[in-house]
Amino acid sequence: MQTILVVDDDPAQVKMIEMTLLEAKYKPVTATNGEEALKAFRQHQPDLVVLDVMMPGMDGWETCYRIRQISTAPIIFLTGRQTTDDKVSGFKLGADDYLVKPFLPDELLARVESVLRRTYRARQPLSKLLRAGPDVIINPASHEVFVHGHLTPLQPAEYTLLVLLAQRPGEVISVNAIAEALDIGENEKRRDRVKWHIWKLRQAIEDDQKHPKLILTEPGHGYRLEKVE
């Protein structure tokens, strides 16, 4: 679960953002001013910061500057001002995106997911990543899987299965080949155990596991991962 630091002196705004992030399976950490934000940042090492510009005491500009001295974690500025100069100043300080108040929760969430995707891809050599669909990215080096920009934990068996399918997109993998990769012994329950792991993997990466579009069943043969064009 990715951690997001939310910094704003408006309690209602913080609560709205916090609930939005929780519903989207992120872990929000909150602060009401720049000083609190820096302490929380050092303690939690968040994956992203949502930072209000206009705060009493240490404002968002100064907070961003200080965070940039210790980290390259992405920062999204929140502001009630719409001037181009403000945006330019924010980007020069190292902000990754800019959101003008008022905004809808869905808009904030879309910005968060977009910035996380861009940041993650920029920090990893593309040749070393595997794709298991338009919005499913695997990093074999760290054993991390991202679905729609979210870090999605998988059990070892499901991770092994996903990598096996992603390394051979469009190719039908037999039940026996999958069972061997997962160290499932030769017995009468072998097919059922493979089916169980397929079900668990679909649950993690498919938008609708009852109508899968990524991991497809080839009756009598096995399973294949839909090839990404």
Image (cartoon, rainbow, N blue to C red):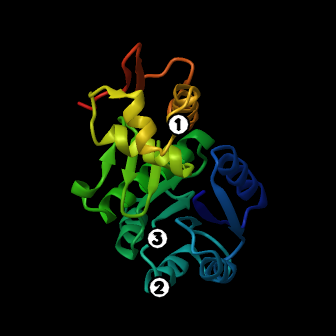
Place of residue 178 in the rendered image (x, y in percent of width and height, measured from the top left): 41, 36
The quadrant of the image that shows the N terminus is: bottom right
- Name the residue carrying label 2: 70
131 is higher (above) or lower (below) than 219: below
The amino acid on which the numbered mark 3 sits, given as a three-letter code, is Ala
Q: How far separated are the C-alphas under marks 1 and 3?
A: 30 Å
* Disc 2 element: helix
> Who's the residue at 60% across and 69% down the image?
54
The amino acid on which the numbered mark 2 sits, given as a three-letter code, is Ile
225 is higher (above) or lower (below) than 145: above
Mark 1 surroundings within 10 Å by alpha-carbon count, few (fewer than 14), some (14 through 19), many (20 or more)? many
> Who's the residue at 39% across and 71% down the image?
89
> Who's the residue at 27% across and 28% down the image?
171
- Name the residue carrying label 3: 73
Label at residue 60: none
Label at residue 201: 1
Of residue 158 and residue 148, the one placed in the foreground of this image is 158
Residue 83 lies left or right of residue 34; in this view the side is left
Which one is closest to the eye, mark 1 or mark 2? 1
> Who's the residue at 69% across and 50% down the image?
22
Name the quadrant containing residue 63: bottom right
The quadrant of the image that shows the C terminus is: top left
Mark 3 surroundings within 10 Å by alpha-carbon count, few (fewer than 14), some (14 through 19), many (20 or more)? some
Place of residue 203 in the rendered image (x, y in percent of width and height, measured from the top left): 58, 33
